[in-house]
Every structure is written in structure tokens, then in C-alpha cells.
Amino acid sequence: MSQPIASLQWPPRPIEIDPASVSRPRLAYFSIVFLLLLAVLLTAWQAPGIWRDVQLKNNGTVTDEFRITKGQCNTRNLVFTDCDTKFQFVTADSDRIYSGEASFMFLDWSSGDYEVDVIYDADNPSRSTLSLGTDKILNRSLTWGAFAILLYGSSILMLWLTVRSHRDKQKLAAPSPLKTVAVEVQNMAKRRKFTLVNYTLKSERKYFKHNIVTKFNADQEPLLLRGPDGKPFGVAVTHQATTTPVLLDTGLTRLNLTDAERQEIWRQLAHMQ
């Protein structure tokens, strides 16, 4: 490449970029609802039991007069364990039989059986749990918190990306002077009627890059050049109202250019190959 891509000269006038050049994340609305639903279900499943067991850990009464009517713990991926139990027990000052149930989710590297007792609230024996739940209370809290943060955070991120794409579409509709930037193409997925391209702004940063997805029609191809290191990169432009780079196509149809202006840009690009 004989000269840097930033030296590309655009016509000295505001140019309109096709708003359709910016695509919202695939299955955006479905993903937001699905992730939020998972987060709410996980919270409803784990949070009440964790709160109950925190209280019983400090103020509960232990009994070894009990029997497990249903108890199963499954370990997945070697460390992720979830237990679903039902049990019956007798309190220390009564012959009445109480029933209880408890579900746990935690990380555990052991592979043996668990020895448990029943812990109950002496003032309200219907509030009960297994000692396994109180022993693993910190583990359970951290595990639930990590999953909750991941799910809620992912849904918020997806919502933000969707809002940003709508905002960018509105801003691109107004003509603006253009600035040329290089982008790194991360992935290209060809379909029968279109091609999805995932790319980021080319920079020295390795983390927290601005990932963008755009869709090219079947008759379009992304505009790629080869850098001094021999690696291909995408040619994109930025609008003055947004920092989101728009990857161009080889025909420059994403820009509102005259035929003469388009020919001049192709001439410049030919000297950069």
C-alpha cells in the first residue's frame, strides 16, 4: 500500500451514508427477553433459599432425626453442582413430623457423597433446610451472583447495542463530511441472500473493542485492502455525529456519490493496493 488509508480524499461536501449500513444485533429483541427471563428465573429459584439459609445458619436448630424422601445432586462440567431435595424431620421438643425442601446451586470440586443434617427455625419449624445449604452459603451466593451478573449484564449490553444501532441509523441519515478509517474484519458469514460481517475499529487496544455487525446484500462485497503486513483490512468511514465506523462496499453504493465522485475514489483506492 503506497499511502495510508486516512489520506483518501472525499468530495468537499457533506455526504449521506445509507442508514441500512448499520445493523442491529441478530435476534436482538429475542435475546434481551430470553436473557432477562433466565435471570429472573434464576433469581426466583436461588435467592429466597439463600436468604432463608443465611438466617438459619446463624439462628437455626440442628436435628439428626430426619429422613430424605427425595434427594439428588448432579455435577456438570466437573464443578457445577445443583441439588434438589425433600425431607421430613422431627423437632427436639415435639413428635410432630415436619416436611421441608431445599434446592442448591454451587461449585464443588469433590466427587464424594454429602453428609447432612436438618436445620430448622425453632419458632417456625416449617422454615427448614439441610446443613449442606448453610455450609455452602458463601459458595452459593457467589455462584448465583456471578450467573445473575452475567445474565442481567448481557441483556443490558444487548439492549444498549440495539439502542445504539437505532441512534446511529438516525444520525447517518443526515449528510456529513466523511473521515476514512481502517477496520479489522473479525468474521464473515455468507448466506444465500446476504453476507454478515463482524468488524472492529482497527486500533492498538486488544480488549473492549467496539464490535459492529453489518449486512451486505447478495450483490455487494465489503471493501478490503491489504496492509503493509500483508493482512487484509476493511475500508470504513465515520460520520461526524457518531463514532461508529461504517464498512464500505466495493461499489461504494453505501454512499450518496455522483458517478464522477465514485470514479475518483476508485482511482485513489487503486493507488493504495
Image (cartoon, grey):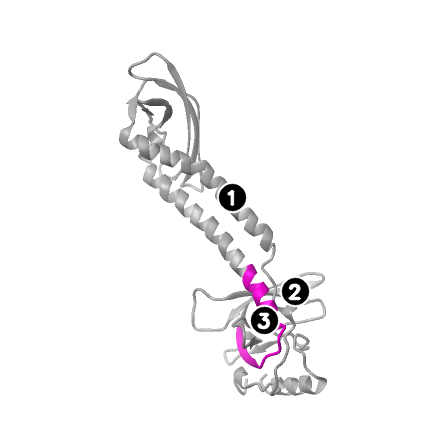
Q: Mark 1: which secondary structure?
A: helix
Q: Find residue 19 and report its image quarter.
A: bottom right
Category of crowding for the residue at label 3, using alpha-carbon neighbours closer than 10 angstroms: few (below 14), some (14–19), many (at least 20): some
Q: Amino acid at mark 2?
A: Thr
3 vs 2, front mark = 3
Q: Mark 3: which secondary structure?
A: helix
Q: Amino acid at mark 1?
A: Leu
Q: Which mark is residue 38?
A: 1
Q: CA distance from mark 1 to mark 2?
A: 31 Å
Q: Amino acid at mark 3?
A: Lys
Q: CA distance from mark 1 to mark 3?
A: 34 Å
Residue 23 against residue 246 in the figure, above or below: above
Query: What percent of the width, then of the height, locates residue 237?
Result: 57, 77
Of callouts 1 and 3, which one flags the residue occurring earlier in the amino acid sequence? 1
Viewport quadrant of the N terminus: bottom right
Q: Is residue 231 visible?
A: no
Query: What percent of the width, then of the height, locates residue 104?
Result: 41, 34
Query: What percent of the width, then of the height, locates residue 57?
Result: 30, 32
Of callouts 3 and 2, which one flags the residue occurring earlier in the amino acid sequence? 3
- Which residue shows up at 32% across the image and 17% down it? 91
Residue 192 against residue 143 in the figure, above or below: below
Q: Is residue 166 visible?
A: yes
Category of crowding for the residue at label 1, using alpha-carbon neighbours closer than 10 angstroms: few (below 14), some (14–19), many (at least 20): some
Q: Which residues are magenta?
A: 162-183
- Which residue shows up at 55% across the image and 51% down it? 32
- The one nearer the camera, 136 or 125, is 125
Residue 257 in magenta stretch: no
- Which residue shows up at 59% across the image and 53% down it? 29
Q: Is residue 225 left or right of residue 157?
A: right
Q: Mark 2: which secondary structure?
A: strand
Return the residue at label 2.
Answer: 195
Q: CA distance from mark 3 to mark 2?
A: 24 Å
